[in-house]
Image (tube, rainbow, N blue to C red):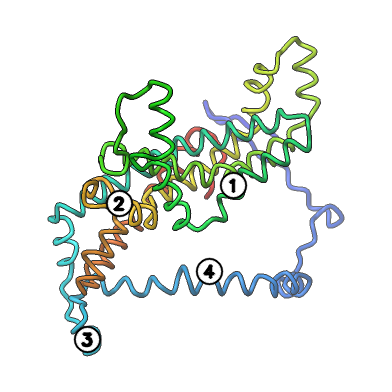
């Protein structure tokens, strides 16, 4: 029923008091008992998350202590925000912050575009055998150790390696490029290696989303005269938009996770100002120098920034009426 009071409109739903139409409320104990096996199966996952994700947060208290190799046994003194003050005044910490953010953005932008492009191309392939072969070949690098991948990259991008030889034979360059010894190439080299390793794996969820799109939408678009590219633009891309937004929010939450292995293994003194990330800084300035409190403070700072970015991306997506993660 609708009532008017002055210039305000008040909408009031008529409540149905019939006991036959009211939903029957189930007791919590009955619900838990009916779903007991689901709860039992969730116990290992909950234990894993608690032990490896939440329990280590108790160690954040050491970020406020002068913890090192000598005070770790007898107990460290509380120094408040002393470790954070040292971090914020340390030049190499901000250098690692810059490198971490730059490489993460490169991985996010180009990695996402490459995954979507590969998924679209595979979705358009009609030969099933060829499609499965390409999927298998692109998935395999994900299971390779980063040590193996970095070793392959070093052999490929060395001064007399295949990449320089190919560029020389095509006349693109006049002399070999020192890919591994010049800092201006390091960020994009890391991004290229990460894309090659993970593009097939990251495209899986986009491929599965595309297979769930209603085929009649493609048929209707074809009847209206839409070509293949137009069907991709107006049917496929809108069909994966919600998945894209959710994955983008998750990836923004991991924006401070540029990696450790590839930067540590591929880096050298010539590219140190471009290869050091926050994780490498934690190892070199915290653990190796026995300044555990400073190392924990740096890791805590990185985690807090990641949480802020996650909630900010989720808030923006909600304001734009897009699917959100939280």
| Marking on residue 49 | 4
Mark closest to the chain's N terminus, 1 or 3: 3
Name above or below for residue 226 compared with residue 75.
Answer: above
How many labels sit on residues? 4
| Foreground: disc 2 or disc 4 | 2
Mark closest to the chain's N terminus, 2 or 4: 4
Residue at (32, 44) in percent of width and height: 101
Place of residue 161 in the rendered image (x, y in percent of width and height, measured from the top left):
40, 40
316 or 144: nearer the viewer: 144
The secondary element bearing badge 4 is classed as helix
Whole-angstrom CA distance, mark 1 to mark 4, is: 23 Å
Place of residue 49 in the rendered image (x, y in percent of width and height, measured from the top left):
53, 69
Whole-angstrom CA distance, mark 4 to mark 3, is: 29 Å
Q: Which residue is mark 2?
A: 267
Q: Neighbour class for label 4 at 10 Å: few (<14), some, many (≥20)?
A: few
Whole-angstrom CA distance, mark 1 to mark 2, is: 25 Å
Hey, which quadrant is residue 67 in on the image?
Answer: bottom left
Place of residue 174 in the rendered image (x, y in percent of width and height, measured from the top left):
31, 24
**Residue contact at pointers 2 and 4, CB within 8 angstroms:** no
245 or 218: nearer the viewer: 218
Q: Which residue is mark 3?
A: 75
Mark closest to the chain's N terminus, 3 or 2: 3
Residue at (47, 35) in percent of width and height: 319
**Residue contact at pointers 1 and 2, CB within 8 angstroms:** no
Q: Which residue is mark 1?
A: 201
Name above or below for residue 108 compared with residue 268.
Answer: above
């Amino acid at each position: 029923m609708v009532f008017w009071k002055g210039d305000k409109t008040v909408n009031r739903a008529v409540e149905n008091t019939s006991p036959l139409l009211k939903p029957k409320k189930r007791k919590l104990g009955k619900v838990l008992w009916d779903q007991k096996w689901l709860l039992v199966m969730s116990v290992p996952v909950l234990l894993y998350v608690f032990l490896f994700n939440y329990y280590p947060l108790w160690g954040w208290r050491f970020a406020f202590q002068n913890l090192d190799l000598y005070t770790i046994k007898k107990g460290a003194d509380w120094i408040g925000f002393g470790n954070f003050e040292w971090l914020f005044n340390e030049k190499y910490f901000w250098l690692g912050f810059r490198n971490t953010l730059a490489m993460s953005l490169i991985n996010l932008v180009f990695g996402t575009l490459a995954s979507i492009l590969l998924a679209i191309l595979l979705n358009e392939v009609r030969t099933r055998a060829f499609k499965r072969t390409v999927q298998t070949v692109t998935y395999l690098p994900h299971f390779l150790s980063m040590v193996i991948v970095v070793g392959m990259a070093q052999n490929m991008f060395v001064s007399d390696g295949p990449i320089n030889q190919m560029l020389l034979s095509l006349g693109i360059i006049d002399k070999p490029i020192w890919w591994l010894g010049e800092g201006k190439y390091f960020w994009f080299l890391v991004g290229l290696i990460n894309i090659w390793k993970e593009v097939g794996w990251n495209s899986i969820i986009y491929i599965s989303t595309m297979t769930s799109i209603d085929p009649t939408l493609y048929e209707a678009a074809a009847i209206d005269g839409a070509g293949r590219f137009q069907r991709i633009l107006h049917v496929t891309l809108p069909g994966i938009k919600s998945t894209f937004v959710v994955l983008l929010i998750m990836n923004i939450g991991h924006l401070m996770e540029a990696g450790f292995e590839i930067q540590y293994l591929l880096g050298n003194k010539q590219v140190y100002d471009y290869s050091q990330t926050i994780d490498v800084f934690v190892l070199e300035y915290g653990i190796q120098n026995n300044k555990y409190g400073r190392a924990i403070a740096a890791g805590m700072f990185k985690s807090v920034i990641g949480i802020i970015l996650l909630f900010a991306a989720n808030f923006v997506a909600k304001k734009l009426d897009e699917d959100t993660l939280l």
